[in-house]
Amino acid sequence: MNTLCFDFGNTRLKAAFFQDTKLIEIFIFENGSVESIGSILKNLDVQNTILSSVVDHDPEIENLLGSKTKFHKLNHLSSLPFTTAVGKPETIGADRLALSAAAVYFFPKQHNLVIGMGSCITYNFINADHEFLGGGISPGMEMRMKALNQFTAKLPIVKPDGNVPLVGYDTVSNILSGVVIGMANEIDGFINAYKERYGNFNVHLTGGDLVYLAPHLKNQIFADPELIFKGLYAISEANNQ
């Protein structure tokens, strides 16, 4: 059974094509047009589709997927491999649901902290009883870079870089140090705080900024840039039986 998983995030619109359980190809869309998605469906043999969206996408996309495939839109009513013990489950972002599903699917009956690196950093904790307890949200790397530029008179926009000095020697390297190493210290701080409360657990780091942050983390992590797609596939399997 072939499955196409769509992830419409704030920064990028992407899709992943699975043949059975194997991820074969990833697509990145310049825009979320019905035509661009329709062209992919024409070129692939797809039976199941699932959409995770945190943006206002064209509703015709859902009509197209529903007419051509067995379609599921991820939401708080989806069948999930975990329960949501938070006060308002309908407010949990679809991306956070998918990341949590991946952790439970691959590391069942264990405490899991999933850290998503997108427009925002999301901290998602699922305990060994498969309960999503919540977590935290903070600004992502691009948001921090833009804020420094927009809320000051002279600081420039700086592009992320993996080669970051601890002690900056000019404006650009000072910003890189403050943002990249600052984020790494934030993440390590959260992990250490969770350790004090929950003891042993797995830490999963995923998302577009993973490559910049992973080298600066002191804690041991599982790094998987495509974790959200694996979670979407698991949810699709549960909802498209």
Image (cartoon, rainbow, N blue to C red):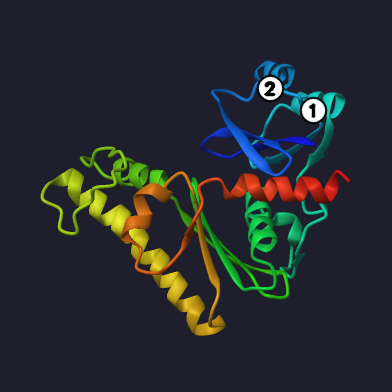
Q: Disc 2 residue type? A: Ile
The crowd level at tag 1 (other Cα within 10 Å; few <14, some 14-19, many 20+) is: many
Residue 65 numbered mark, or none: 1
| 84 or 58, nearer to the observer | 84
Name the N-terminal-most of marks 1 and 2: 2
The residue shown at (73%, 16%) is: 42
Look at the picture and state if 97 lies above or below 133. above
CB within 8 Å, label 1 to label 2: yes
Per the image, label 1 sits on a secondary structure element best described as helix
Q: Which residue is mark 2?
A: 37
For the N terminus, the image quarter is top right
The residue shown at (84%, 48%) is: 239
Spatial separation of the CA atoms under disc 1 and disc 2: 9 Å
Based on the displayed image, in which of its 4 quarters is residue 131 positioned?
bottom right
Query: Where in the figure is residue 144, as x and y percent of width and height?
Result: 37, 49
Based on the displayed image, in which of its 4 quarters is residue 7 positioned?
top right
User: Relative to 84, is 218 on the left or the right?
Assistant: left
Per the image, label 2 sits on a secondary structure element best described as helix
Q: Residue furthest left?
A: 169
